[in-house]
Amino acid sequence: MTRRIASVLVAVLVMITSGCELSQDDEMAPRPTKTVTKSQRPDTATTTPAPKTLPVGEGTITPQAVVWAQESTLHYGTKQVDVSPLRIDSFVVVAGGVFFLSRRELWFTDLSRVRGTGFAGVTRLSATADAGALRVDRGTGSGGNYAYDLGTGESMSADQVVPATDEDLRGTAEQVELRPAGSGEETPSAAPVEARRGPGNFGVVGGDGERLAVFDARTRKRVPLTGVLGNGFQLVRWQGGVAFFGVALEDGNPLAIVSCNLSSRSCTTFGKPVEGISLVFESAA
């Protein structure tokens, strides 16, 4: 059935209080607003040809940023943008912006406006580990896979694009026998625990009901951290060799989004999820 082309309403860009760190009290403070202009919504018919080009990012966001979503709200760092009446079903972060799916339509935002791409009927969205290329799938076999160079926006062969995996984002899964911080090599190791080894010399331990802990992969000793919240942790992604972010849990429920820096050995709270609304994080293969 053909759907009408509808005009997309003006949305509101909500800017959270500025600063590198956000305390829990600051998160509750009123926020100034800024208008976001959206382009006209594209035809959603799955027979629409794939676009030859996609928008290229011009915003200040990077793939290493703390990014998460709930329904129509996209959080990035200590700021957020409302993309209503669209919703965010899945997304990937690239240099200068975020591509996201809303009811199988592909959209792009540079965090000051939201633009339609003309790409409908999309079943899966992913990017390469270096966020240099985007892959868009329609779920119709090899002929339904498309890819784009995110430096130029031009289409390219989907066979050249290898999407980032869960391991690329969260590190290698392994079992580790940890030692207490400050212990010597003669100290007996504890029982093996499930961990995620990062791209540098550190790893993360934590799960539902398991408080966040970091260890030095060379010595297997725990690294003390300040700012740890809750009694559980869900790792979302590594932001480099010495930083990562994830969800602090309290009895299995999302408590806060936190990012930890192992150079300063501290964790910072970036926001509190709205209770009862599903959290969405960057897509992986």
Image (spheres, rainbow, N blue to C red):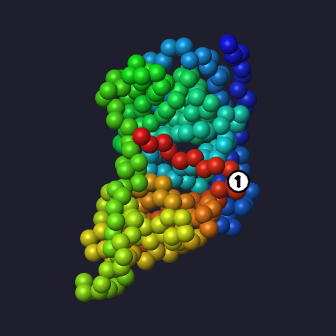
Residue 131 in view here = no
Q: Which residue is mark 1?
A: 276
- The percent coordinates of residue 63 (x first, y second) are 44, 46
Does residue 92 lie above or below 219 as drawn?
above
Q: Nearer the viewer, residue 275 or 63?
A: 275
Decide if residue 174 is on the left or right side of residue 231: left
| Amino acid type shown at disc 1 | Gly
Decide if residue 193 is on the left or right side of residue 220: right
- The percent coordinates of residue 219 (x first, y second) are 27, 75
For residue 114, which quarter of the picture?
A: top right
Residue 140 in view here = yes
Does residue 65 lie above or below 156 as drawn?
below
Q: Secondary structure at mark 1?
A: loop
| Identity of the residue drawn at 49% across and 32% down | 124
- The percent coordinates of residue 163 (x first, y second) are 38, 37
In the rendered image, which quarter contains the C terminus?
top left
| Identity of the residue drawn at 68% across and 13% down | 1
